[in-house]
Amino acid sequence: MSARTVRPRPLLAVGAVVVALMLTGCTDDGGTEPDPSASGSPGAPPASADGSGPSAAGPGASASTFPVPAQAQPSPLPNLGTREAGGLTLTLNAVRRVSPEAVVVEGTLVAKSTTPLLNLAEPGFAVRQEGGERPSTYEFSAVSLSAAGDPKVYLPLRDDKGFCACTQGIQFLDGGKSMGVYTYVTAPEQAENVTVTVARFAPFTDVPVTQ
């Protein structure tokens, strides 16, 4: 029995809504001129309420530095499996659910030597017609999902023009360098584990889907 392909036409918009907050300054039109006889020298920081000392640094004062503790270390990315093919190493970092019917697949590519990334686009989407030209997309979109007991094959999300919600424009990866990649993919509802297949690499089986 052949697998049924699921390819929704509308792209689920993924982005952050940016809200600009304007802070309005207040002025006091009824203010008085400062008293030259008032205590304190020009430029001195204001005194604290109990008179024990300055409450804040005044203009031009030096700021104190707070070095990062030596024991602070960056957290490593999760490793759900590693596969090698064609001079590339792909580490699967996460399969996160972003809606009842979609997940984002995240990974890291590492090249042993300078490698063209020409075969990581979903078949049929390696090139795209744009204004009379057919440039390569260099997408990381040759990604599909399947689940036990479900005959369907789930493919990347695309809009009605064929653009995927995925990493694009990655033409080459220099030797020894790494880069993060991602693809938003339709997914079986309620599935807790899936098989992730990326072209050129052996499948990642029984991968947990996180929230």
Image (cartoon, rainbow, N blue to C red):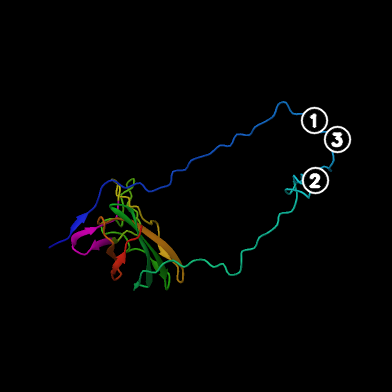
Local crowd size for mark 3, using a 10 Å CA cut-off: few (<14), some (14–19), many (≥20):
few
Residue of label 3? 36
In which image quadrant can residue 170 be found? Answer: bottom left
Quarter of the image that includes the N terminus: bottom left
Q: Which amino acid does label 1 sit on?
A: Glu
In which image quadrant can residue 137 be found? Answer: bottom left
Q: Which residue is at a point 73% across and 48% down the rendered structure image?
A: 55
Q: Which amino acid does label 2 sit on?
A: Ala
Q: Is residue 147 magenta?
A: yes
Q: Which residue is at a point 41% across and 70% down the rendered structure image?
A: 111
Position of 186 relative to 25 (above/below)? below
Local crowd size for mark 2, using a 10 Å CA cut-off: few (<14), some (14–19), many (≥20):
some
Which contiguous range is marked in magenta? 144-157
Residue of label 1? 33
In the shown orientation, is residue 32 left or right of residue 176? right
Mark earlier in primary sequence (2, 1)? 1
- Can see residue 138? no
Q: Which residue is at a point 24% across and 52% down the rendered structure image?
A: 7
Residue of label 2? 44
Q: Residue 42 location in percent, x, y? A: 82, 42
